[in-house]
């Protein structure tokens, strides 16, 4: 019984990881194609990620913005 429970829990964890990965892929696709600039900041205000539109607006690469 314990083995079956462990197996079921592992299947649930794998399913959740797959759904999370799919959701992140969809979000990234949306952000890469929206006509507005989007930026993710950390708690200190440093840029973690910028979408292509923001980079175009600012004339900088994502790597330059992250420095």
Image (cartoon, rainbow, N blue to C red):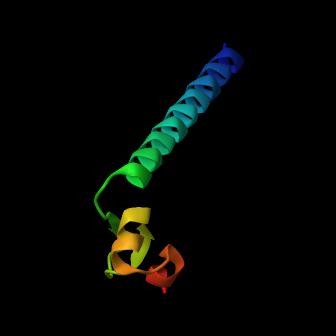
Give the image location of residue 61, x and y in percent: 49, 77
Instruction: Name which quarter of the figure residue 11 lies in.
Output: top right
Above or below, comparing residue 37 to residue 26 in the picture: below
Instruction: Name which quarter of the figure residue 23 lies in.
Output: top left
Name the one closer to the observer, 47 or 2.
Answer: 47
Residue at the extreme left of the image, as rendered:
36
Q: Is residue 54 left or right of residue 3?
A: left
Name the one closer to the observer, 49 or 58.
Answer: 58
How many dots with numbers?
A: 0
Q: What residue is drawn where x is 43% and y is 54%?
A: 32
Quadrant of image for the N terminus: top right
Residue 51 appears in the figure: no
Give the image location of residue 67, x and y in percent: 49, 87
Give the image location of residue 49, x and y in percent: 44, 68
Q: What residue is drawn where x is 51% and y is 32%?
A: 19
Q: Is residue 45 left or right of residue 67?
A: left
Q: What residue is drawn where x is 50% and y is 84%?
A: 64
Q: What residue is drawn where x is 34% and y is 51%?
A: 34
Residue at the extreme right of the image, as rendered:
3
Name the one closer to the observer, 43 or 8.
Answer: 43
Residue 32 appears in the figure: yes
Give the image location of residue 13, x and y in percent: 57, 32
Above or below, comparing residue 3 to residue 48 in the picture: above
């Amino acid at each position: 019984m314990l083995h079956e429970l462990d197996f079921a829990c592992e299947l649930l964890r794998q399913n959740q990881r797959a759904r999370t990965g799919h959701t992140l892929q969809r979000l990234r696709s949306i952000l890469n194609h929206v006509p507005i600039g989007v930026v993710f900041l950390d708690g200190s205000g440093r840029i973690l990620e910028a979408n292509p539109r923001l980079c175009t607006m600012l004339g900088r690469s994502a790597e330059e913005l992250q420095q």
